[in-house]
Amino acid sequence: DPRGLYTCEIDGKRKSLQVHYRMCQNCIEVDAPTISGIVIADLVATLFLAVAVYCITGHDRGHTSRASDRQNLIANELYQ
């Protein structure tokens, strides 16, 4: 616990310093492995979300081919 009154004496001169220090109760140490773990987890979650969105929206199309759309437009003389 670094709190307290510190004194320094040089050549008969005395200086004192009062230290007030509050330590965090629920803090975590942020070092390189922690940051890299957070970044990797974020990338994996983003990739998983992108694949999920692709799988949900990519296969339920049910549209006809473009060729049939084009044939319908060509056959209609009003739009030619």
Image (cartoon, rainbow, N blue to C red):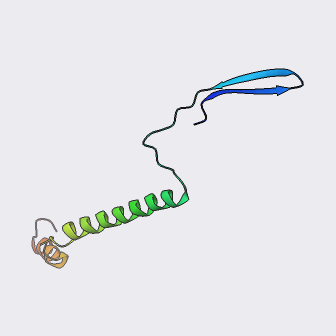
Residue 39: % across, % down: 45, 59
Front one among 21 and 65 = 21
Q: Residue at 74%, 26% (x, y): give it.
A: 7
Residue 47: % across, % down: 35, 66
Front one among 80 and 59 = 59
Front one among 79 and 27 = 27
Residue 75: % across, % down: 10, 75
Front one among 66 and 27 = 27
How many numbered badges does the structure rendering display? 0
Image quadrant in which you'd find residue 17? top right
Q: Residue at 77%, 22% (x, y): give it.
A: 15
- Farthest residue to the right: give it: 11
Q: Quadrant of the N terminus?
A: top right
Residue 35: % across, % down: 49, 56
> Is 25 displayed left or right of 31 in the figure?
left
Q: Residue at 43%, 64% (x, y): give it.
A: 40
Q: Quadrant of the C terminus?
A: bottom left
